[in-house]
Image (tube, rainbow, N blue to C red):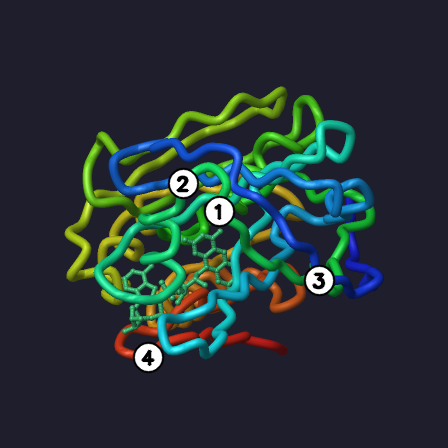
Amino acid sequence: MSFTFKRVMHELRRRKLTVRATQRVTPEMLRVTFAGDDLRNFTSAAPDDHIKLFIVQENGDVVSRDYTPRRFDTGERTLDVDFALHDAGPATRWALAAKPGDTLEVGGPKGSRVMEGEPDWWLLVGDETALPAIGRTIEEAPAGTKVISLAAVTSEANEQHFETRAQYEAHWVHRPAERADDPQPFLDALAKLALPEGDGFVWIAAEAHVTRAVRDYMRGERKRPPSAVKATGYWIKGRADASEKFED
Ligand SMILES: Cc1cc2nc3c(=O)[nH]c(=O)nc-3n(C[C@H](O)[C@H](O)[C@H](O)COP(=O)(O)OP(=O)(O)OC[C@H]3O[C@@H](n4cnc5c(N)ncnc54)[C@H](O)[C@@H]3O)c2cc1C
């Protein structure tokens, strides 16, 4: 089987949403469910799409941060966003304080990178910030598709279970939050991971240093062709509002 990617653009809109509920998915993952009529024509065509959350700070300045539309229902007009909790940052602070009735402006997704065709298997590698996209990919995978995930969290209590019709194999790495920029736990786990035969697709999203090292390993030692590896640094340790695309 083979696959390619198509870029699909969406009408860029800002939506004003209201918090309906908050819930701890795990101790370190907070789900905020938004609702609002503005969601009636919300579109997100790929599981690793992102939206921009516009956070109004105490001094009135507005900052934006990227998050994954974890789940949405245009009929019910709801949207879930999962926040990986960490020490600092306006988006994380906003989520921790969010309560029903609060409002937030959200922009996008501007576009989606949609897969056409189907790889023989998927390998999804990521840290806590990638779990929303990993979860969506697994849940949306067609029945029988081989999907392997390797995700890092701080403890067993922070592992997530995903419902899927895919043939799914989950691997978890535990490392402390202070080591979230250290690729070694991922590289050790990957060295023990057998990959299926055939035309696979590798998706990587984590702290940028981790992403780069995992991408280099998959392209080097594991000889995956560059076009079959998509790697994004979802955040950069020590820098606010930072991400990194590793384009070929
Ligand atoms: C395409 C895309 C999709 C994303 N989807 C999600 C998602 O669905 N859920 C999610 O939780 N995150 C997601 N992220 C990551 C998220 O945008 C960043 O973690 C963001 O920096 C958080 O904003 P903040 O305001 O809390 O912190 P910032 O103000 O941006 O950063 C403050 C400090 O915290 C550090 N920091 C940022 N993120 C983390 C972290 N996760 N752990 C430890 N330290 C951190 C920064 O290095 C900086 O020193 C996504 C990123 C991208 C590019």
**Amino acid type, callout 1:** Asp
Q: Mark 3 points at which residue?
A: 14
Kindly identify the residue that appears in the image at 56 percent across and 60 percent down.
224
How far apart are labels 2 and 4 at the CA level?
28 Å
Q: Is mark 2 on a helix, strand or loop?
A: loop
173 vs 73, nearest the viewer = 73
- From the viewer's perspective, is the residue at label 3 or at label 1 nearer? 1
**Amino acid type, callout 2:** Lys
How far apart are labels 3 and 4 at the CA level?
26 Å
Kindly identify the residue that appears in the image at 30 percent across and 51 percent down.
85
Q: Position of residue 49 (x, y in %)?
A: 64, 55
How far apart are labels 1 and 4 at the CA level?
28 Å
Q: Mark 4 points at which residue?
A: 239
Give the quadrant of residue 211: bottom left
Q: Quick check: 136 left or right of 74?
A: left
177 vs 106, nearest the viewer = 106
Q: Do the residues labelled 3 and 2 touch (CB within 8 Å)?
A: no
Q: Do the residues labelled 1 and 4 touch (CB within 8 Å)?
A: no
**Amino acid type, callout 3:** Arg
